[in-house]
Amino acid sequence: MNLKKILTFAGVGLVLFFLIAEPQQAAQLVQNILATLRGAAEALITFVKQLF
């Protein structure tokens, strides 16, 4: 196995452990990330609207 596969498996394992051990915190983290992405998308839309 090469290093990339090992790190990928370790990362997936860590994410799965976090989801199983702390599901409410994991859900809150996902909600925060989605809220940030939504805010960024809305800001971009507002910017483009102002151009035209």
Image: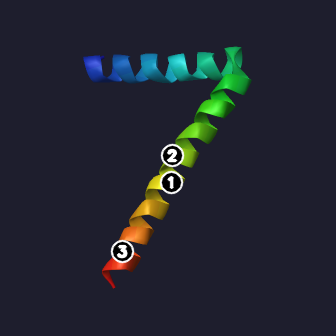
> What SS does tag 1 mark?
helix
Measured in 3D between alpha carbons, the distance from the residue under mark 2 to the one under mark 1, in whole angstroms, is: 5 Å
For image coordinates 30% across by 17% down, the residue present is 1
Q: Does the CB distance between marks 2 and 1 fall below 8 Å?
A: yes
The image quadrant where one finds the C terminus is: bottom left
Give left or right: position of 21 versus 14. Answer: right
* Label 3 crowd (10 A; few <14 / some 14-19 / many >=20): few
| Residue lying farthest to the front in this orientation | 50
Indicate the quadrant where residue 44 lies: bottom left
Q: Pinpoint residue 7: horizontal percent, then vertical percent.
A: 36, 18
Give me the C-alpha separation between circle 3 and circle 1.
14 Å
Question: Considering depth in this image, is 38 or 22 the residue closer to the camera?
Answer: 38
Assess whether mark 1 and mark 3 are in contact (beta carbons under 8 angstroms).
no
Q: Is residue 15 visible?
A: yes
26 vs 45: above or below: above
Mark number displayed over residue 48: 3
- Say whether residue 26 is left or right of residue 46: right
Task: From this view, report whether residue 37 is shown above or below residue 45.
Answer: above
Residue 39: numbered disc: 1
Amino acid type assigned to the residue bearing label 3 in the image: Val
**Where does label 2 land, which residue?**
36
Quarter location, residue 23:
top right
Residue 33 pos. (x, y %) = 53, 40
Which class describes the residues within 10 Å of circle 1: few (<14), some (14-19), or many (20+)? few
Horizontal and vertical percent position of residue 22: 69, 18
Q: Which amino acid does label 2 sit on?
A: Thr
Residue 2 appearing in the image: no
Q: Nearer the viewer, residue 30 or 18?
A: 30
